[in-house]
Image: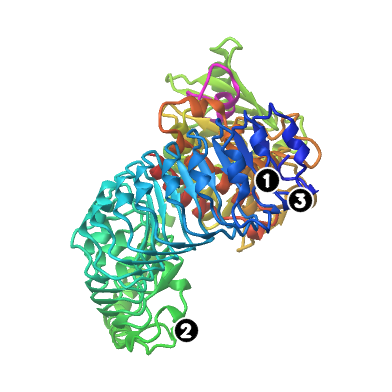
């Protein structure tokens, strides 16, 4: 009964249903006291009361529901997140079921200390006690929770040393100790946490050097040590952290030079070393951080120049080197065209473009004068003589029937690029299959398999010229396909056109359409195959949107328009209703309808076609690929769409909507869940109602590559 508009008190009579196994009342508006008689439900395995306004008995400071639930010997899941409980955690917490795997009390205004008896919950996989007011030290006995994968204690008032008992949690994946009052060193035994992927310990009072053993955690994806009093230098070689995507070391007292080996962490998306005492130069190797989106080196003692190698960082959207001692020219290529003066202030030796309010670089002025001098003295006279010679040569050619020569040359060039195929050869090619060659049916015709005279397998799209719009669709596909070349787009071989017949000849894709692989019983795609396919599709769309002088909007992304070659590489096809955005236009209008279920709201309501519309369709495609549910399924009626279905299930029951075959594959279930959760989050970001709020296809590619890396 979660995610409704239920209010009032949770009725005690609910506990009369003694065979209940699962109770989910999350995301409602229940208020008043939580009944403390849930212990009557002896078969209860799952209790979720998240996001309500429920309270406890004000006359008893302890969380009495815990005492009641000690009778539920099969309890596996207990979550009371974001309820104003304002209670103490009773010692009886250690008497809960030994089957309990998840305990979530985040944001419940809990106070007092964490009982040592919590170490008795030997089956715990996840313990979330963040955003409360717990005080005192963290029990060292917590190291007994050998199965624990997630320990979330952020935003409390815990203090003391970080206990060495944490180092016994060898299955730990995520550890959040940030925004507390821990002091002293990070235990050197942290290297025992070989499975650790995310480690937050920022905003504490840690006051030692960073243990060298920390840099041996090769599975780390996120490391946040910011806002402490850590000192010392960074190790010369940090290449062991080659999976790292976020590194935050800002607001400490770290010193020495920045290791050039940081440039080897090619998956790094966010790097912050701000407000330390680093000196020396910015490593040239940072130009290899191809995934980098944010780089903050502000408020240090860095000197030297800003490396021009940083111009190659295509995804860099935040850059800050202010308050240093840098000098020389500010780079102007790549992402630097978008950075403001705030990125560079308080570096008195810098020079660059006038818009940045820095002096113009002297070398630039001298270079311009030198260039002008060379042009006037050498290049201009030589080019004048060359022009006269060319004109004379062309005059001679005129008397030698040069027009015919030039025409033949153009034909030869076209022949080298496009193969000439006649109507007769197309008819022969398709007849070889005795009619059993239909590959699919599109909006304006049919696609057949054929074999050319040289034995080449091809796909032939024959347009039904009796349909309104077929002529225009053929011309549009020719216009689009003749100017694009990309690994993930269908390759055009040639066309055949006269007044009565129009066809496109394309490369044949052995593995057929994505539609077939998703929705037929004898085909199946693994998790990594699906991830690779969605990356391929995104790369194709990115090329269409940004790869040429004219932006191309596909307008009809769906599984039947995605073809797979022999290596399962995806190719986007069918540009019959594509739009060319000329002159910098970001959108245009159309009267042509795309496929229901996939088109963006503004497309269906107003006929608005834009790159953001393709992103929306891509988001729906993501949902379909990983849930194996078509957006046109009969379950989706009225306002209830596949988007709403995923949105409702995302937080609590995502595992119930994804394609079950993915969960049956070999591999760690937690890793699959993390991967699927990230993908569905991305799909929801793509399908925001307003076009301006949707993510960009470039960010989609970056996110998917990170998801793939994490999954692998």
Q: Quadrant of residue 654?
A: top right
Number of the front mark, 1 or 2: 1
Q: CA distance from mark 1 to mark 2?
A: 52 Å
Q: Earlier in the sequence, mark 3 or mark 2?
A: 2
Q: Nearer the viewer, residue 193 or 288?
A: 193
Is residue 656 in view?
A: yes
Q: Position of residue 660 (x, y in %)?
A: 55, 27
Q: Is residue 62 left or right of residue 15?
A: left
The residue positioned 52% from the left and 34% from the top of the image is 494
Label 2 near label 3: C-beta < 8 Å? no
On whether residue 235 falls in the magenta region, the answer is: no
Q: Quadrant of the N terminus?
A: top right
Q: Which mark is residue 26?
A: 1
Q: Secondary structure at mark 2?
A: helix
The answer to whether residue 503 is above or below residue 647 is above
Part of the protein shown in magenta? 505-524
Q: Position of residue 529 (x, y in %)?
A: 45, 32
Q: Position of residue 240 (x, y in %)?
A: 24, 51
Q: Which mark is residue 607?
A: 3
Q: Which mark is residue 355?
A: 2
Q: Is residue 552 left or right of residue 221?
A: right
Q: Quadrant of residue 311?
A: bottom left
Q: Position of residue 475 (x, y in %)?
A: 64, 41
């Amino acid at each position: 009964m979660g995610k409704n508009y239920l209010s009032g008190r949770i009725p005690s009579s609910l506990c009369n249903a003694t065979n209940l196994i699962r109770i989910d009342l999350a995301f409602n508006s229940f208020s008043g006291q939580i009944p403390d008689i849930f212990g009557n439900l002896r078969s209860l395995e799952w209790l979720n009361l998240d996001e309500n306004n429920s309270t406890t008995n004000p006359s008893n400071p302890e969380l009495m529901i815990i005492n009641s639930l000690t009778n539920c010997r099969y309890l596996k899941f207990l979550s009371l997140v974001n309820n104003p409980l304002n209670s103490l955690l009773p010692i009886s917490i250690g008497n809960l079921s030994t089957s309990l795997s998840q305990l979530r009390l985040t944001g419940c205004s809990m106070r007092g200390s964490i009982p040592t008896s919590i170490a008795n919950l030997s089956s715990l996989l996840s313990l979330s006690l963040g955003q409360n007011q717990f005080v005192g030290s963290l029990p060292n006995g917590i190291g007994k929770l050998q199965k624990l994968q997630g320990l979330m204690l952020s935003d409390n008032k815990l203090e003391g040393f970080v206990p060495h008992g944490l180092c016994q949690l060898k299955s730990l994946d995520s550890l959040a100790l940030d925004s507390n009052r821990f002091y002293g060193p990070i235990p050197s035994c942290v290297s025992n946490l070989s499975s650790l992927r995310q480690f937050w310990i920022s905003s504490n009072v840690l006051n030692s050097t960073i243990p060298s053993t920390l840099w041996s955690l090769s599975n780390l994806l996120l490391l946040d040590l910011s806002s402490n009093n850590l000192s010392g230098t960074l190790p010369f070689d940090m290449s062991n952290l080659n999976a790292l995507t976020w590194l935050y070391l800002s607001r400490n007292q770290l010193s020495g030079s920045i290791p050039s080996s940081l440039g080897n962490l090619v998956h790094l998306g966010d790097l912050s070393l701000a407000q330390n005492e680093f000196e020396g130069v910015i490593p040239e190797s940072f130009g290899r951080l191809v995934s980098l989106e944010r780089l903050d080196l502000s408020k240090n003692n860095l000197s030297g120049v800003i490396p021009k190698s940083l111009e190659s960082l295509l995804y860099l959207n935040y850059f800050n080197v202010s308050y240093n001692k840098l000098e020389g020219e500010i780079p102007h290529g790549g992402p630097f065209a978008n950075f403001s003066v705030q990125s560079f202030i308080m570096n008195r030796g810098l020079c660059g473009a006038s818009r940045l309010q820095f002096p113009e670089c002297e070398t630039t002025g001298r270079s311009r004068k030198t260039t002008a001098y060379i042009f006037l003295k050498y290049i201009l006279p030589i080019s004048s003589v060359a022009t006269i010679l060319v004109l004379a040569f062309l005059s001679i050619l005129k008397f030698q029937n040069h027009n015919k020569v030039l025409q033949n040359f153009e034909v030869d060039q076209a022949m080298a690029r496009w193969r000439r195929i006649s109507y007769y050869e197309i008819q022969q090619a398709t007849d070889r299959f005795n009619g059993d060659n239909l590959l699919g049916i599109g909006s304006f015709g049919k696609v057949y398999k054929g074999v050319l005279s040289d034995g080449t397998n091809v796909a032939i799209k024959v347009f039904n010229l009796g349909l309104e719009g077929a002529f225009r669709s053929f011309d549009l596909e020719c216009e689009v396909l003749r100017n694009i070349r990309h690994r993930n787009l269908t390759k055009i071989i040639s066309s055949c056109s006269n007044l009565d017949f129009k066809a496109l000849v394309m490369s044949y894709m052995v593995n057929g359409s994505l539609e077939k692989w998703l929705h037929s019983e004898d085909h199946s795609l693994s998790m990594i195959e699906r991830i690779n396919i969605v990356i391929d599709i995104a790369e194709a769309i990115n090329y269409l949107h940004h790869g040429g002088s004219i932006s191309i909007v596909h307008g009809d992304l769906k599984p039947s328009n995605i073809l797979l070659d022999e290596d399962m590489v995806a190719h986007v096809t069918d540009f019959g209703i594509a739009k060319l955005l000329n002159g910098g236009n970001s959108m245009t209008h159309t009267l042509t309808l795309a496929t229901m279920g996939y088109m963006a709201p503004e497309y269906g309501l107003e006929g608005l076609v834009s790159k953001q519309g393709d992103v929306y369709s891509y988001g729906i495609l993501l949902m379909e690929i990983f849930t194996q549910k078509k957006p046109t399924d009969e379950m989706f009626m009225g306002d209830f769409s596949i988007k709403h279905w995923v949105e409702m299930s995302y937080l609590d029951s995502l595992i119930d909507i994804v394609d079950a075959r993915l969960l049956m594959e070999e591999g760690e279930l937690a890793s699959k869940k993390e991967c699927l959760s990230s993908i569905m989050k991305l799909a929801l970001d793509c399908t925001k109602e307003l076009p301006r709020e949707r993510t960009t296809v470039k960010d989609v590619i970056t996110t998917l590559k990170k998801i793939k890396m994490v999954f692998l």
